C-alpha cells in the first residue's frame, strides 16, 4: 500500500522553513534564492561537502547524527580557513521510501547544531533519488578580508602543531564495527567536534592550516605539498587520549590507524616559531589544547620519526572513491 | 577486469582546477575553502540545485548537456532574483562505474558555459556513490544591496509579463520521448537558456519574479501565493513559438502541457503598470521579447481565461518527488 506523504512545499514549510527563521536573506525559504549581505571588511568563505549513505555514514545512522556530520565536516574546513560560520545551504536527496519521521529527526539535528554553532539555513533544494540518501551542505563563513587561511603558505622552519588528540575517530570507527571496545571513541567518530571557536583565532598566527579529515599524515602532507615543503612528525609527540593510549599499549599495530585514519576533525597548523606564544595564548583563551609535533623544512614528502628513527611515511589517507 | 582509474586529486587537477584558474578565491582548488571577496554595495545571491540521473536528466544524456543543465537551472533562478552570476561550487557524485571520458565531457560542458555566462568554478566536492550520478550546483551572483527580487512583492494591479515563448520545453520533452516530431523544441528542452542578461535589468522595474521551471500556471501561482494575491492569465496572450503554435493547432489538448509543463526557464514578472515602458526599454536593449499575459488582483489562486471564459486553474506543476 502506497503511503500518502507530504509534498515538497509542505516538507519545506514544516521542517526547513523554521530553520531559516532567523536569517532574513533566506526569505522564509519561499524564494528560490538566498541573499547574503556582504561587507568590504570580510571575505565570504564557502565550503561544500557531500555525504552519501553507505559511503560516508552508516545507512541506518540516526538522522540527527547524519545532519550533524554533514554540517560539521564543512564547519571544520571553515575553521581551518580561519572563518566564523554563519549560514549554510542544504541539498537533500531523499530515497524513494523516505519517511517523515526520518526528515523530522534530520531537521532536529540541524536545529540543534544551528544553536550550537550560531548558524542558520539560508536555502537549498530537496529532491528524490532512486539511490541512497545524499546530503550536500555548502557552508558560509566570514574571515577578515584577504586573511583566509589555506594549506599553502607554510615556510621552512615553521612548526607543526595540532589541536586536541589524534586518532580517536579512527579507533572509534573500529569500535563502531565491533572490532574494539571503546564507547567514548565511537562517539567521537560518529559526531565530529569542529574547532569553530579556535580556528578564527589562528588568523595572524598560522601560516597554513588543514583540518584533519583524511588522517594526520595525509593532511600534514597536504600542507607540505601545497607549500612545496617537507614535513616531519615525531610520533611520540602526537597527543593521544587516555583511551587511545591504553589501546595502543595493548596493540601497537593500531598506530597506523591513529596516524593514517581520518575523521578527527582536529586542526593541523603551521606556525612560525616566533608566534608560538600567541598560539598558546589562543589555546588558553579557548580551552583548546595544542601540541607541537614536528615542523616544515625544504624538500618534499612526510617524514615520521619513531623512537629517534626517521622514515619516509606514505601519505595514505582516506580515499574518496 | 578492474580498470585502473585516476584518483580524486588527479581528477580535480586534470579536469576541475583549469575551470577555477581565473578565480583567485578558488586557490586553484587546492584549498578546501573558497574565498569570495565581498563589498558593501551588493548582496551575494545564492541558488542551490541538485539534478539526479534518471530523475532530472536522462541517464544516457551527453555529459556536456548534463553540466549545462545543472548550471543553467541555477543561473535561471539567479536571473529571476535580478542577480548577475559570477561563480559556483560543484558537488559531483559519480557512479561506481564512472569513466574519465564522461568526466572530461562534463568538464568541457562546464568550461563552455563558464565562457558563455562569465562565471568560474570556485570549489566543491567529488565523491563516489552507489546510486545514480548526482550533481549539485550552488551558484553565486551579485545584486545591488537590498534590491534582490523574489516571488513576494507583487501588488494588486500589477501586470504579469513573461519573457520569450512558453511551452516549448514541455513539447520538447514529448519530442524527446518520441511522442512528437519537433527537433527545435527538443533542443530547447535539453538545453535551457537562462535569462541572465535580462534578469538584472528587472531590478527597479519588477515587483516580483519567478523563473518558469515548474510550469507557467504553477510559477505564476507561486508569485501570487507569496504575494498573497490572485493571478489571472489570458491564455490567448501567452506567447508561443511558431512550432508550438502549429502543434497546438493540430492537438489543442497539448495546451495543458504548454501551461502546466516545466523547464521553459523563461521569467514570469510582476510589473506595476507605470513601469511598463521601462520594461519594454529593457526588452529592446537586450533583444529579449516580453509579453503581457495577465495581472494580479486581491484574492487567492490562479484564474485562466480562455476565449473570454474565466476558470480557476489547478496550480499543478512539476512535482519534485
Image: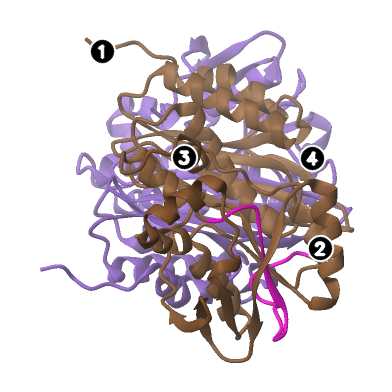
Chain colours: A brown, B purple
Q: Dividing the image into 4 quarters, which one contains the N terminus of chain B? A: bottom left
In terms of secondary structure, where does tag 4 sit? loop
- Numbered disc in front, either 1 or 2: 2
Q: Position of residue B34 (x, y in %)?
A: 65, 62
- Numbered disc in front, either 4 or 3: 4
Q: What segment carries the magenta color? A: A148-166
Q: Magenta residues: mostly which secondary structure?
A: loop
Q: Which residue position holds label 4?
A: B205
Q: Which residue position holds label 2?
A: A279
In terms of secondary structure, where does tag 3 sit? loop
In three-dimensional space, the C-alpha distance between marks 4 and 1, rounded to whole angstroms, equals 47 Å
Q: Is residue A302 left or right of residue B81?
A: left
The residue depicted at 52 percent of the width and 57 percent of the height is A213
Label 1: how many Cα within 10 Å (few below 14, some 14–19, many 20+): few
Query: For residue B95, which numbered disc appears in the image?
Result: none
The answer for which chain carries disc 3 is: B
Q: Dividing the image into 4 quarters, which one contains the C terminus of chain B? A: top left
- Numbered disc in front, either 4 or 1: 1
Q: Which residue position holds label 3?
A: B240
- Numbered disc in front, either 2 or 3: 2
In terms of secondary structure, where does tag 1 sit? loop
The answer for which chain carries disc 4 is: B
Q: Which residue position holds label 1?
A: A2
In three-dimensional space, the C-alpha distance between marks 3 and 1, rounded to whole angstroms, equals 39 Å
Q: Earlier in the sequence, mark 1 or mark 2?
A: 1
Amino acid at each position: 500500500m502506497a503511503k500518502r506523504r507530504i509534498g515538497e512545499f509542505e516538507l519545506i514549510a514544516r521542517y526547513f522553513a523554521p530553520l531559516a527563521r532567523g536569517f532574513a536573506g533566506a526569505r522564509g525559504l519561499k524564494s528560490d534564492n538566498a541573499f547574503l549581505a556582504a561587507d568590504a571588511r570580510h571575505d565570504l568563505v564557502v565550503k561544500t561537502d557531500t555525504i552519501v549513505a553507505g559511503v560516508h555514514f552508516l545507512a541506518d545512522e540516526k538522522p540527527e547524527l547524519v545532519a550533524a556530520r554533514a554540517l560539521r565536516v564543512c564547519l571544520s574546513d571553515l575553521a581551518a580557513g580561519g572563518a566564523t560560520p554563519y549560514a549554510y545551504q542544504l541539498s537533500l536527496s531523499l530515497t524513494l521510501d523516505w519517511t517523515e519521521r526520518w526528515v523530522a529527526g534530520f531537521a532536529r539535528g540541524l536545529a540543534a547544531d544551528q544553536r550550537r554553532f550560531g548558524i542558520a539555513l539560508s536555502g537549498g533544494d530537496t529532491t528524490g533519488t532512486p539511490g541512497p540518501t545524499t546530503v550536500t551542505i555548502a557552508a558560509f563563513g566570514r574571515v577578515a578580508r584577504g586573511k583566509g587561511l589555506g594549506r599553502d603558505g607554510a615556510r621552512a622552519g615553521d612548526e607543526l602543531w595540532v589541536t586536541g588528540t589524534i586518532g580517536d575517530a579512527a579507533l572509534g570507527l573500529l569500535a563502531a564495527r565491533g572490532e574494539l571496545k571503546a564507547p567514548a571513541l565511537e562517539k567521537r567518530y560518529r559526531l565530529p567536534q569542529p574547532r569553530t571557536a579556535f580556528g578564527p583565532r589562528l588568523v595572524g598566527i598560522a601560516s597554513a592550516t588543514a583540518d584533519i579529515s583524511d588522517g594526520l599524515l595525509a593532511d600534514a602532507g597536504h600542507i607540505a605539498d601545497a607549500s612545496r615543503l617537507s614535513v616531519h612528525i615525531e610520533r611520540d609527540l602526537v597527543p593521544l587520549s587516555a583511551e587511545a593510549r591504553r589501546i595502543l599499549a595493548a596493540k601497537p599495530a593500531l598506530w597506523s590507524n591513529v596516524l593514517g585514519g581520518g575523521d578527527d576533525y582536529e586542526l593541523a597548523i603551521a606556525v612560525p616559531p616566533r608566534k608560538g606564544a600567541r598560539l598558546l595564548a589562543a589555546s588558553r583563551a579557548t580551552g583548546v589544547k595544542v601540541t607541537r609535533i614536528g615542523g616544515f623544512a625544504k624538500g618534499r614528502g612526510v617524514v615520521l620519526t619513531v623512537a629517534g628513527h626517521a622514515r619516509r611515511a606514505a601519505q595514505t589517507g582516506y580515499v574518496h572513491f
